[in-house]
Amino acid sequence: MEVKQISVFLENKPGMLTEFAKILQKNDISMKALCLAETPEYGVLRIIVDDNYKIATVLKDEGYVYRVTPVLAAVIPDKPGSLVKILDVLAANDINLEYTYAFITREKDEAYIIIRVQDTEKANKVFREAGIKLLSQDEIDKM
Amino acid sequence: MNNCYQPDIETAPREQIKAWQDERLVRTVKHVYDHVEYYRNKMKAIGLEPGDIKSTEDLYKLPFMSKDDLREAYPYGLLAMPLKDCVRIQSTSGTTGKRVVAFYTQNDIDMWDECCARALVAAGATPEDVVHVSYGYGLFTGGAGFNGGSHKLGSLTLPMSSGNTDRQIQFMTDLHSTILCCTPSYAAYLTETICERGLQDQINLKAGIFGAEAWSEEMRHDIEDKLGIKAYDIYGLTEISGPGVSYECQEQDGMHINEDNFIAETIDPKTGKPVPDGEKGELVFTSITKEAFPLIRYRTKDICILNNEPCACGRTFKRMSKPLGRSDDMLIVKGVNVFPSQIETVLMNEGYPANYLITVTRENNSDKIELQVEITNEMFSDELSEVSKREKKLVNALKSMLGIYVDVRLVAPKTIERSEGKAKRVIDKRNI
């Protein structure tokens, strides 16, 4: 079970993220999670949104360079130590974590960890075996 | 396939070409000596008489002409015919200073048109073709030259001029243009737009003739593949006539110089000494049939290699390589000669679009060269380390081509200005 992350190339200049956010606003696309990795010259914006088809169309029309990447969204209790369990499972199975970021929602007492690994399928399997719940794209869209 | 507009001339035996050149050179030298004070003074200053020039073997005795001479003699100082016999003026873009104007009699125009018709036929044009001319019309020689050549050949001519890309593409599809003539950077832009709109199937082009600025083999292949055409190079300069001084044949291996009208030499740019065929040198032209504005040993500043080997197409005219660089365009960064065409080659090899901007600055007496490149979907990744790895690969490729470090800056697509004429690729902010 994987979810889709949209990664977007942004130049590291004032106003670039604003411009991007306005496009989402205009098209009524809601961001569930956001993470920005940057160099002095450019950044890679990674987002999880509620409508992947729409955002892909919009970004294409607006001329952005972007990529759709499969990531895992693990559900953990919103309390200290929860992340350790996830990381232990990955380490025990020799899976390297490329990057990760987290988000929470108002409704539930849960936290969500976005995990990017090279072998998504393997990570999926080991999480399932360890009894860790993963969100589906459907669940994200309905959040 | 031996498609020549004037086979008797274009495939004439070398001895015949030499005989034409000998006779026409002698005549031209006498013509300028008798009618142009500027030439007379230059020749007298070194004790040279027209009678000293008996054949092309004596060419080296004649003094060089440069753009500075043209500026000094502006506007009428090199005119070799009465104004009443002139029918046209064309001019250079004047980007490097005062404009240079060139005068043409009707015979000069006819000769120029013929040269362009040869180029069109070499690219496969026939009277059945629709020649789409997207070079600028006006003082610039691009539009006028191809317009004249296409008329001479009897093809249907579309005098589009440059700009208005939507209209260009509409005419191209509605009127079934078969031969496209424009600058290579505009050809690349048109190609990109046509592909973006998915109109490849509605385009009837079979060939393109792209000149007036430097372009690489990679760019040629890219345009050829995307539009399904053959892309030909052409060379020329206003001072000598315009496009069609030399042109490519189906072999696409160098441009045949119209040697019945122009004598080409290559020289060492520092010493002025002739360089043998097959070696790099500055290209020098002497026009031997022009009436109004003949130029003797004009230094083009283009670095080229001349090739006298027989060509498989059957033409006997000597070939010149694509200019390997132009000393005006040539940048000296940290003491190293850098040609924008080299950078373009690396970009195409590495899969980047050939749309780029070079900025040279000087900080603390040290040169810095920055290259802005548009990132593509293929080059992008959600992982920063992956993007910077690709960026580093480009930096290394540039370093191995140029020998210096280039600061690569990845920018968003479509942020570098597209050009509809000659592309502005270099900004030199050093005040030296």
Image (tube, rainbow, N blue to C red):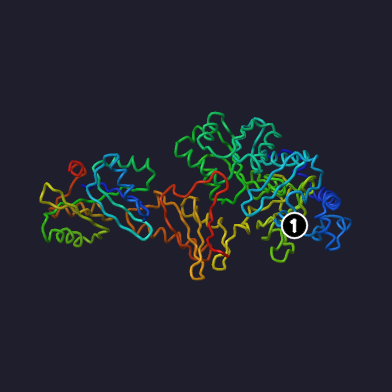
Residue B48: horizontal and vertical position, in percent? 86, 60
Residue B387: horizontal and vertical position, in percent? 37, 57
Which residue is labeled 1 in the image? B65
**Kind of residue at disc 1:** Met
* Residue positioned most to the right: B51
Residue depicted at x 20% and y 62%: A91
Residue depicted at x 80% and y 57%: B59
Q: Using residue B228 as the reference point, say whether residue B319 is left or right of it.
A: right
Q: Using residue B263 as the reference point, say whether residue A84 is left or right of it.
A: left
- For the residue carrying disc 1, how many other residues have a C-alpha within 10 Å: few (<14), some (14-19), or many (20+)? some
Residue B55: horizontal and vertical position, in percent? 85, 55
Q: Secondary structure at mark 1?
A: loop
Residue depicted at x 56% and y 30%: B176
Q: Quadrant of residue A95?
A: bottom left
Along the line of sight, which residue is nearer the eye, B170 or B232?
Answer: B170
Residue B370: horizontal and vertical position, in percent? 48, 60
Disc count in the image?
1
Along the line of sight, which residue is nearer the eye, A17 or B394?
Answer: A17
